[in-house]
Image (cartoon, coloured by chain):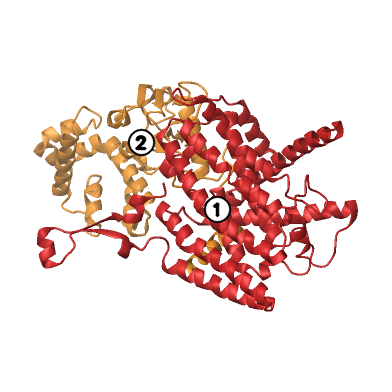
């Protein structure tokens, strides 16, 4: 390993860390402001112009807080968990390009790398839950494991549709294939699957059941404070940024401007700005959804994932494969995909989650058996089996 | 599904609206409280005489459910000089606002319009007992409240601190002569006239009785007490005395005010 390479790697890692930290700080401010506007509040206003320096004040506060360790905690697991969550989130950005040339390492199997690394963060959440020696934390950790593993499947399948369409796993080539038309035109169903599963992967509202404050009081993060908590926080926002960036790269044409191609150093800068603008538009969409929908119940979450998204993602792949194999015109893919999307929405509207009529446990007494009337209806069978 | 989209639309619409909250600690961005807002109690200031309305009668202290008040009373120096009608005045007053439950019972029971619920609502202080207010503090709160809502006492006549003008004997007929024009008078004018008549009667009573010996002989005990209206009578006795006087006069003169309302009849008959 030459000295130049080592310096390049160190500088790259440092630059990436600084870039991601700045993005996270901006995101926290945007999130607080967006939520405040939705709730007709002002949001942070005191530190800096309209609270623009609030994230820095928050960071200083978090870093200066005391790190607490529960006396029954499993120390190595407890202290390593934040790292196990943060590292995968950070590593993803090695191969995510901001512009054609602005990338640390353009991997040929970029999408495959992203999928395989992103799954690792589940382990960190389970570690945090286990190491905290807290019943809410372990519940949250197991919820996270159940949720993230279930939604990993439609997430990967939706990515696969795009990969089939562009015949590449290289993110740069996927963007290059969208210079005339963005993939969202051919894959509306794929976008829905990817975005929904991505929200669930992030654990953001309406899928935030693993740190649901009203149920498990913060879940795996319940015992963490100060700097270690802020590492979880950092990882969460980096993941949000990643999902938004991937949505833009895979479905909205990355840094492609509709007509003008960007060339040269200035072009790279402009591309990056345009790409970040698109990404932040998606992020604001995520915050908008957070400000609108309440949290799903765990049985609704599971049945939505397994009964709706997983079959649909297979249908999406089969549909894409058929169209590509027989060389049908691309608008067939668009129309069928849109019809399927409409059907999905119809099913969601008709049956959000559990079928209570079917799943309700009926309790009979001897007399009611004779008269044929139900005396009591209990909880649903999905609730009792749960996600774990 | 329409419901999901409607939900997104609702939040989008509310994001476009103006924020309804204010920056609280900033003094210039605070929202004003409503005019009828009921904050902590404060003492009112009589601007005519430049003294508090409060006479230190302690009825608010006795009725306070949390016993958050203490007060002491003193002789009013202004009354001694003849500048005020309040013979007693508040000396010291303290309210522990941390104990006050803002029930406004003190306001309801006050006979002198002396205490009101002000607009003050901020309790946070840097000192441990910083929210105990003494007399100057309560009067300052009251002063702010008075200027904010342009406060006037609920019973202006009864609780006016201006010393009562004693009408001289010679002016009495003029006051009586004004009586037939009652129908056109406002309530205040009527009250003023009644008071003038009462004063005239008090000063001229002895001579009036002397002119009518027959009635005086018929009701000697009444005459004895009525010469000094400020003697130590219970309210009941005083009312009875007044009734007896009126009866005696009516019998002596043989006529009453025919055209007046019943409520005014008793008042009028006393000065004939």
Occupied quadrant, residue A5: top right
Which chain's colour is orange?
B
How far across and down, in percent of the image, does residue B81 sit?
43, 24
Report the side of B123 relative to B257 (left or right).
right
Residue that mark 2 sits on = B112
Q: Which mark is residue A258?
A: none
Q: Nearer the viewer, residue B13 or A118?
A: A118
Q: Is residue A277 visible?
A: yes
Q: How many marks?
A: 2
Image-quadrant location for residue A352: bottom left
Task: Give percent across and percent down for residue B105.
Answer: 32, 37
Dividing the image into 4 quarters, which one contains the N terminus of chain A?
top right
Is B16 above or below relative to B60? Answer: below
User: Which element carries disc 1, helix, strand or loop?
Assistant: helix
Residue occupied by mark 1: A152
Give residue B178's position: percent from left, percent from top.
35, 52
For label 2, the SS is: loop
Picture layout, residue A304 above or below residue A60: below
Q: Residue at x 25, y 52 (%)?
A: B264
Residue at 88%, 52% (x, y): give it: A266
- Pointer 1: residues within 10 angstroms few (<14), some, or many (20+)? many
Colour of chain A as rendered: red
For mark 2, name the chain. B
Position above or below: A220 against A362: above
């Amino acid at each position: 390993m030459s000295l130049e390479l080592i310096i390049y790697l160190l500088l790259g890692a440092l630059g990436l860390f600084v870039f991601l930290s700045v993005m996270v700080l901006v995101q926290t401010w945007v999130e607080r402001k967006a939520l405040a506007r939705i709730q007709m509040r002002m949001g942070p206003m005191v530190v800096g112009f309209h609270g623009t320096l609030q994230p820095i004040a928050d960071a200083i506060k978090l870093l200066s807080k005391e790190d607490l360790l529960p006396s029954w905690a499993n120390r190595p697991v407890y202290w390593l968990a934040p790292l196990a969550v943060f590292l995968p989130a950070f590593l993803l950005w090695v191969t995510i390009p901001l512009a054609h040339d602005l990338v640390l390492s353009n991997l040929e199997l970029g999408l495959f790398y992203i999928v395989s690394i992103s799954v690792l963060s589940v382990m960190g959440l389970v570690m945090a839950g286990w190491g905290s020696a807290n019943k809410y934390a372990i519940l949250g950790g197991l919820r996270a494991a159940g949720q993230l593993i279930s939604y990993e499947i439609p997430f990967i399948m939706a990515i696969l549709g795009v990969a089939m369409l562009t015949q590449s796993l290289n993110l740069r080539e996927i963007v290059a294939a969208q210079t005339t038309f963005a993939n969202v035109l051919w894959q509306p169903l794929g976008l829905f699957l990817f975005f929904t599963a991505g929200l669930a992967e992030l654990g953001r509202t309406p899928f935030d059941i693993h740190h649901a404050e009203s149920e498990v009081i913060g879940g795996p993060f319940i015992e963490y404070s100060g700097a270690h908590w802020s590492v979880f926080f950092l990882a969460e926002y980096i993941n949000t940024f990643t999902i938004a960036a991937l949505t833009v790269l895979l479905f909205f044409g990355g840094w492609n401007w509709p007509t003008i191609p960007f060339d040269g150093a200035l072009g790279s800068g402009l591309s990056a700005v345009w790409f970040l603008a698109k990404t932040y538009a998606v992020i604001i969409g995520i915050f908008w959804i957070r400000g609108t929908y309440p949290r799903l119940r765990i049985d609704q979450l599971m049945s939505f994932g397994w009964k709706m998204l997983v079959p649909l993602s297979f249908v999406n792949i089969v549909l894409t494969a058929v169209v590509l194999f027989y060389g049908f015109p691309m608008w067939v893919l668009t129309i069928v995909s849109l019809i399927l999307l409409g059907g999905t929405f119809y099913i969601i509207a008709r049956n959000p989650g559990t079928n209570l009529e079917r799943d309700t446990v009926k309790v009979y007494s001897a007399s009611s058996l004779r008269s044929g009337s139900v005396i009591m209806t209990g909880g649903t069978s999905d609730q009792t089996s749960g996600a774990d | 599904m329409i419901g999901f989209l409607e939900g997104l639309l609702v939040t989008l619409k509310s994001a476009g609206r103006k924020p309804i909250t204010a920056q609280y600690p900033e003094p210039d961005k605070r929202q004003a409280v409503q005019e009828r807002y009921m904050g902590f109690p404060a003492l009112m200031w009589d601007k005519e005489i430049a003294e508090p309305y409060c006479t230190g009668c302690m009825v608010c202290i006795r009725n306070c459910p949390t016993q958050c008040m203490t007060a002491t009373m003193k002789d009013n120096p202004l009354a001694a000089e003849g500048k005020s009608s309040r013979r007693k005045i508040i000396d010291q007053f303290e309210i522990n606002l941390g104990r006050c439950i803002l029930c406004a019972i003190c306001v309801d029971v006050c006979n002198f319009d002396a205490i009101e619920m002000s607009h003050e609502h901020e309790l946070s202080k840097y000192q441990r007992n910083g929210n105990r207010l003494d007399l100057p503090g309560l009067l300052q709160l009251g002063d702010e409240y008075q200027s904010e809502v342009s406060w006037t006492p609920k019973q202006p006549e009864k609780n006016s601190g201006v010393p009562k003008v004693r009408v001289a004997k010679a002016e009495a007929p003029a006051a009586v002569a004004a009586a037939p024009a009652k129908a056109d008078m406002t309530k205040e004018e009527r009250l003023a006239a009644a008071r003038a008549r009462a004063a005239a009667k008090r000063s001229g009573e002895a001579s009036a009785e002397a002119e009518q010996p027959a009635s005086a002989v018929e009701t000697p005990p009444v005459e004895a007490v009525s010469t000094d209206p400020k003697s130590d009578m219970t309210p009941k006795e005083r009312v009875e005395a007044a009734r007896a006087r009126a009866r005696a006069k009516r019998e002596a003169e043989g006529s009453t005010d025919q055209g007046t309302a019943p409520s005014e009849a008793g008042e009028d008959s006393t000065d004939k």
